[in-house]
Image (cartoon, rainbow, N blue to C red):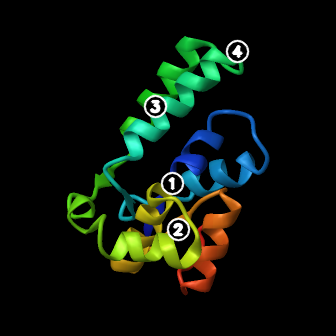
Amino acid sequence: MRRIVLDASAALAGAIEEARSTDVRRMMRGIDEGDALLVPVIWRFEVGNGFLMAVRRRQIEVQDARRALETLGAYPILTDGDGPGIAWSSTFDLAEKYRLTLYDAAYLELAQRENAELATLDGRLAEAATAAGVRLAL
């Protein structure tokens, strides 16, 4: 069983045409029934906002955004409830150490704490994950 922390950039790229989105689709298809997808509490807001911005920029139609959100919602995604309690401690420390936003550091912290792979298309976050010893899923 793999444990994968899925960040918003990877989730969005699977539905919106962006660079390397084929890698995201392949990763999502490769998720086995026993695999666990983990996300911090901010994930649904970030993904929803990403789709909303794509609709406003006319990159996708609103019905396509809703369909993509329904598809993502069908995956067995586990939302981390412990993240907010450590946002101002270990997550803050990671953000400062690797020059990340606190939002991005939440994904890195979750991957570290859960000994999980990280699925991200964010270059800075991927570099920080590698430096921190976190395996990348993409």
Q: Is residue 81 above or below residue 76?
A: below
Q: Earlier in the sequence, mark 3 or mark 1?
A: 1
Q: Is residue 69 above or below residue 121?
A: above
Among the 4 quarters of the image, the one containing residue 73: top left
Disc 4 and disc 2: Cα gap in Å?
29 Å
Q: Which mark is residue 7?
A: 1
Viewed as shown, does residue 57 lie left or right of 68? Answer: right
Residue position marked by numbered label 3 in the rendering: 48
Residue position marked by numbered label 2 in the rendering: 118
Q: Residues within 10 Å of mark 2 (few under 14, many from 20)?
A: many
Foreground tag (4 vs 2): 4
Disc 1 and disc 4: Cα gap in Å?
23 Å
Q: Which mark is residue 58?
A: 4
Q: Residues within 10 Å of mark 1 (few under 14, many from 20)?
A: many
Which of the pair 97/41 is nearer the observer?
97
Residue at left offset 30%, top offset 67%: 88
Task: Give the residue type at disc 4.
Answer: Arg
| Quadrant holding the C terminus | bottom right
